[in-house]
Image (cartoon, rainbow, N blue to C red):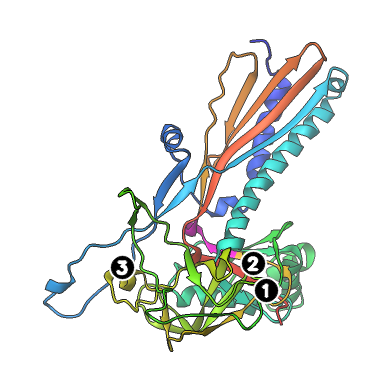
Amino acid sequence: MANEFSKEETVAFEEECLGFEDQLAISEHVSIYRPDSTTMERSGDVIWRPQPYVAQSFDGMDQTANFKDKTQLSVPTTLGYEKSSNWIMDAKQLRDALQEGRLYTAAREKIASDINVAVLEHASMFGSLFVKRAAAAAGFDDVAQCEAIMNEQGIPGYERCLALSSRDYLGMANNLAVRGTVAGKVEKAYETGYVGRVASFDTYKLDYARRLALAAGGGAITITTLAAGGNVYVPRATGTAATGERSNVDNRFQNVLVSATANVKAGDAFTIATVEAVHHITKQGTGQLKTFRVVSITDATHMVITPPLITAQGGTDPELQYQNCIVGTPAANSAIVWLNTATAATNPFWQRESIELVPGHYVVPDGAGVAVMRATTKQGIELVMQKWYDGMKMKIFYRVDALFGVVNKNPEMNGIMMFSQP
């Protein structure tokens, strides 16, 4: 081989990979799916992953009329992130081993950050649960509202996580630090700004948090919630194109008709008058308005939202199976009320199984004039490091690569909390 890694470089790479795992604090708390690389190549790096079934139950001994097919929903997962960190060192710079080590560390930190940010972006932009807090972060009651919205809708109570922006996290730590009744935690909060586990959530401090601008759509936008208004969504596993071709359907999103979309943007959160959230298993109303997020703007009167309006007004089995809301008073002009009323940081919270990290794999041939090293983290993320030498310029080229995907499998099992919202 024309290029080889020195023993020192090999050791440094192994050490940086261990450090890389330490950096993946957020991505450790989502589910992992490891697809076969051959299958992904043949499918264009897209694979459909099943969503959990939601079962129904019926009363009585005679169940003749209740034996029906169940609708299995799925979502597309794509290996859509190709992250690379590159640098060059010449023959003089190589004399300083410390400089080389710093470049390894910088590459590791950047790619680890890219993975964590990708996970947070999927929760921050697609998570449909929205907790609005009028004041700054204060303590237990803030997190308790996240627990309440999840409990009411039947989201599993285990492995829940909440990632807070630094200022919001420290605001909670301050509330804890002034207490004298919580042994152990008070000292940690005062000395290190530590919050820890609160109201069934493991909490984490972010050095990066997406900021969401205030909704500017105004209070005059309405949406039809009539059964015949075109916004009643019926889940389906597959759809048939005009050519007769059948393909899977992504039921996380719906293109809805509204009175206008002027100044509305992706990420905006809203409720709809009299549209109440239900418990996903019992289908009982929660007494709380269902929260939705804008995914994209289609045209002047259509926008894509998540989750879809599955109101069961049509009475079909798929609607009854996956019903997520009740319309109290159907109307042609139900009012939309925006929830993100001030620009602020988003604080994503999620149940582990609702977001999935999908590691990818690069096939880089050895013995082709480029030295190659590989390492795999415990999450399955593969790092590929390559090195080659240009004798004409006396320079060595390095690159570190990672291929992965992230999918928000169920936006109704994750969301965001925003503070200081008037």
Q: Does residue 127 sit above or below 363 in this rendering?
A: below
Residue to which mark 1 is pinned? 215
Residue 200 in view (yes/no): no
Quadrant occupied by the C terminus: bottom right
The amino acid beneath tag 1 is: Ala
Residue 21 point in image, percent of width and height = 63, 43
State the residue position of label 2: 265
Residue linked to disc 3: 318
Of callouts 2 and 3, the N-terminal one: 2
Marks 2/3: CA–CA distance: 30 Å
Measuring from the top left, give residue 297's x and y in whole percent: 58, 64
N-term-proximal mark, 1 vs 3: 1
Q: Residue at x 38, y 82 (%)?
A: 284
What separation in Å lies between label 1 and label 2 (alpha carbons)?
Answer: 7 Å
21 or 384: which is nearer to us? 384
Mark 3 element type: helix
Question: Mark 1 and 2 residues: CB-CB less than 8 Å, in contact?
Answer: yes
Q: Residue 142's x, y, as percent? A: 64, 77
| Label 2: which secondary element | loop
Magenta residue span: 349-355
Secondary element under disc 1, as helix, strand or loop, is loop
Residue type, numbered disc 2: Lys
> Disc 1 or 2, which lies upstream in sequence?
1
